[in-house]
C-alpha cells in the first residue's frame, strides 16, 4: 500500500515534466482559424455573346479566412468557355481553371490563391446543364449558357 502511495505521485510528476510546452499549444490555437478555409464565389456566369462565336466565364472570388478578393474571367470560341489551369485573375495572386471532365461529364472549377507562403486551393464540379437564351428579335443572336448558381462556396485546402 505504501509503495503505490509513493509511486502514483512520482508518475504524476514525471508526466507533468514531459508535458507539451505552452508554445505548441499556442501554435495549435493559431492554426484553428484556418482549419476550414473556403472561397466565396459570386456573380458566376458562363455564356456566349449574341452574334459572336466567343463565350466568357466570369466570377468574383473572396478567400476565407484571408479576406482577399479577385475578379476572374476568360474567353474562348465555342458555346461554353473553358480555361486551362492557371489562368490569372486580377490580382494575379489568384488563378483558376475551368475545364470539362469527360469521365464525369461535368465542368471542374479550380481556384487557387498564392498567399505568399502557402497555396489555398479548392475545386468544385459544375454540372453540364445548358440553356439557350433566346433573342426574340433576332434568332441568330441566341446564345448558350450554363445553368448554375451565381453565388456558392468552394471548400479549400491550405498547403
Image: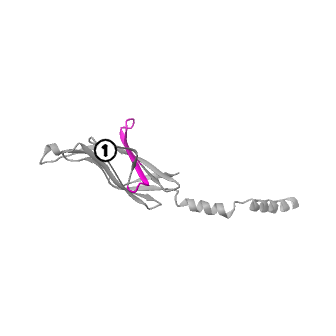
Check the image and name the residue furthest to the left.
137
Based on the displayed image, in which of its 4 quarters is residue 70 positioned?
Answer: bottom left
Magenta: main secondary structure = strand
Residue 95 vs 100, above or below: the answer is: below
* Percent coordinates x, y for residue 68 in the rendering: 43, 60
Q: Is residue 146 visible?
A: no
Residue 151 on the magenta span: no
Residue 105 on the magenta span: yes
Residue in the foreground of this view, choosing between 118 and 148 = 118
Q: Is residue 45 visible?
A: yes
* Percent coordinates x, y for residue 103 in the rendering: 39, 35
Name the side, left or right, on which 138 lies relative to 21: left
Q: Quadrant of the N terminus?
A: bottom right
- Coloration mode: one colour
Based on the displayed image, in which of its 4 quarters is residue 125 positioned?
Answer: top left
Q: Which residues are the magenta region?
A: 90-110
Element class at badge 1: loop
* Percent coordinates x, y for residue 109 in the rendering: 39, 47
Q: Residues within 10 Å of mark 1 (few under 14, many from 20)?
A: many
Residue 123 vs 101, above or below: the answer is: below
Check the image and name the residue furthest to the right.
2
Residue in the foreground of this view, choosing between 133 and 94 = 94
At x 44% / y 58%, what residue is drawn? 63
* Percent coordinates x, y for residue 128 in the rendering: 32, 42
Residue receiving disc 1: 81
At x 45% / y 59%, what residue is drawn? 64
Amino acid at each position: 500500500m505504501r509503495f503505490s502511495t509513493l509511486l502514483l505521485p512520482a508518475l504524476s510528476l514525471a508526466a507533468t515534466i514531459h508535458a507539451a510546452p505552452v508554445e505548441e499549444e499556442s501554435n495549435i490555437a493559431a492554426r484553428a482559424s484556418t482549419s476550414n478555409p473556403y472561397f466565396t464565389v459570386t456573380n458566376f456566369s458562363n455564356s456566349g455573346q449574341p452574334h459572336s462565336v466567343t463565350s466568357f466565364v466570369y466570377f468574383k472570388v473572396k478567400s476565407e479566412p484571408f479576406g482577399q478578393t479577385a475578379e476572374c474571367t476568360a474567353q474562348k470560341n465555342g458555346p461554353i468557355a473553358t480555361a486551362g489551369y492557371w489562368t490569372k485573375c486580377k490580382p494575379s495572386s489568384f488563378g483558376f481553371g475551368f475545364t470539362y471532365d469527360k469521365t464525369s461529364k461535368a465542368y471542374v472549377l479550380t481556384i487557387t490563391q498564392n498567399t505568399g507562403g502557402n497555396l489555398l486551393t479548392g475545386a468544385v464540379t459544375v454540372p453540364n446543364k445548358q440553356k439557350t437564351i433566346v433573342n426574340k428579335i433576332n434568332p441568330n443572336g441566341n446564345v448558350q449558357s450554363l445553368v448554375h448558381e451565381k453565388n456558392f462556396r468552394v471548400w479549400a485546402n491550405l498547403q
